[in-house]
Amino acid sequence: MKYRKLLCLLLALSASTSFAATQLTTSPNNLVLQKQPSFFRFSFDEVSMPQNIQPMGLLGINYFADITPNIYAGVGGYGAVTGSQGGLFVLGIEGGLHHEFFPHWWGDAGVFAGGGGGRSSLVGGGLMLRPHAGIAYQWSWARLGIHYSYVKFPSGFIHSSQVGLDFDIPWDFYYVSASDINSGVFTLPDIKLPLDKFLFLRRNDFGLLVQAYKQKPGTKNNAGMVQDGTIGLVGAELDHYITDNGFWYVKAAGAFSGIPNGYMDVLGGLGYHWGLGSHGFALVPQFGIGAGGGGMVETGGGVLIQPQLGVEWPLSSHFATRFSGGYLWSPKGNLSAVTGTAQLLYHLDIATAANQPGGYLPEKFDIQGWRISIFNQKYFHPQRTFTTSTSAINMIALQFDQLFTPNFFISYQAAAAYSGLHAGGYATGMIGPGLQTSPFFSKHLQLFTEVLAGAGGGGSLALGGGALIEPVVGLNYAFTPGISLQTSVAELKALRNNLNTPLFNLGISFEFGMLERA
């Protein structure tokens, strides 16, 4: 079956990342900050569409780890930004080979497999395959390349080959072994760095958010009917500071009220933290560009623009709130809305390695634990709006767990369908708290439970406005301190319609630590 093939590919790619960096043995007062060579890839393809539909511009954003100097693997997604398919998003995994065959010149070949889509009549169950091959020229700070790719939705109607562009940015990742996560507090002399590197703290803010898009009166949807209700959304945002005050950010959100389910958007851009006095208050202007659509919202090709201005004030050394107002519009569509956003921010001052000494460093550091899980998620009998059929659908899911204590964590999950009756375009975003036991059975087994809530839409599932709740219970089996097989069962319920189905999850987890200011 297709989902089994995808799961096997998922597990093979994920398991291979365990060899990406050597797990160095540490002891108390000897913490090793380890380097994982990695890079972001931005790509663009102009995809030919069936049925005389306007070609679709497909923007890809992926993050890859170099498992070896020539093999890479990672996760990412693709979204429509031109044409008439606004709201098409795909989430998945990708692996490939690249090699410098001549100074500065690289050859590259790989394949992406994932789930998602937009209008299910075109993408079928949602599975998208994208093999590619190309060449690139490398500078010290980036690679620019040209590729030939083939985009195919096997159960749908989109099958297109094209020449496109790649832009790679090196973004090495520094971490500590999972076995060091609960080791306590460290001082500067305890921390061991790669040769010729210096410790540097980089500020990041992670925010959970709720939003309201108040649409312009008389706004029409993609069926030409008036649909101008206020859209309620939930989501998350990451701000990465590139100077003391300037940052780039990426934000993803999905609708849970105000319109038919299915709307989501992903925006990124630049911001500035303008401090007001010595009490931590700040003005935060931001300007973002991205893609969005679904839920019958008419966004044209999918491109969105959003300027906004926020006011931020601290709650503690690690937490702050930010309230922002702005304007969102789609240049090629009908969406036009005044926006309001409320965020709870968590400050992540993450230690990394730099080529030269940085500024002020604190005296003490501790470790924030993280777990990344990639898994197959099966809905056994999801209710639909257009038929009485409750045949199963399968999703590819990516989840981040932030381990605040050995027994308490917060989960952030995104998932998209790749098989099932008219499932293409169905996706969810979930957030919630979790509890886990201490490891037992020679530290191989660990029980956990979560209560996730969020939004979903698409695929003609009976979701109402899109609000969802999902209690989960599961088991981790650890092969090593950092690599586990994860399985769980859950019950997914829509709060405003009759979707109510059991779930089964199976995948692989990677646990690691990030060094932070104590």
Image: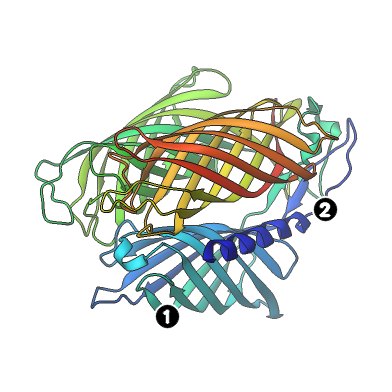
230 over 166 or under it: above or below = above
x and y percentages locating residue 461 in the rendered image = 33, 48
Q: Nearer the viewer, residue 358 or 175?
A: 175
Percent of width and height locating residue 126: 42, 62
Horizontal and vertical percent for residue 142?
59, 65
Residue at (41% x, 27% y) in the render: 322
Q: How many numbered tags mark residues here?
A: 2
Can you identify the residue that label 1 sits on? Answer: 162
Measured from the top left, where is residue 245 in percent x and y?
50, 37
Residue density around tag 2, few if under 14, some if 14–19, many if 20 or more, within 10 Å:
few
Q: Is residue 79 left or right of residue 485?
A: left
The amino acid sitting under disc 1 is Gln
Picture quadrant of residue 331: bottom left
Whether residue 69 is situated above or below residue 189 in the rendered picture:
below
Relative placement, left or right, of 139 versus 217 is right
Q: Which image quarter is the N terminus in?
A: bottom right
1 and 2 marks in contact (CB < 8 Å): no
Say which residue label 2 marks: 22
Residue drawn at x 48%, y 24% is: 320
Q: Is residue 159 visible?
A: yes
Write down the quadrant of residue 489 in the picture.
Answer: top right
- SS at circle 2: loop
Q: Find the distance from the CA under tag 1 to the CA under tag 2.
A: 38 Å
Residue at the far front: name it.
388
Q: Work out whether 99 lies above or below 497.
A: below
Q: Nearer the viewer, residue 77 or 438?
A: 438
Q: Earlier in the sequence, mark 1 or mark 2?
A: 2
Residue in the foreground of this view, choosing between 151 and 44: 151
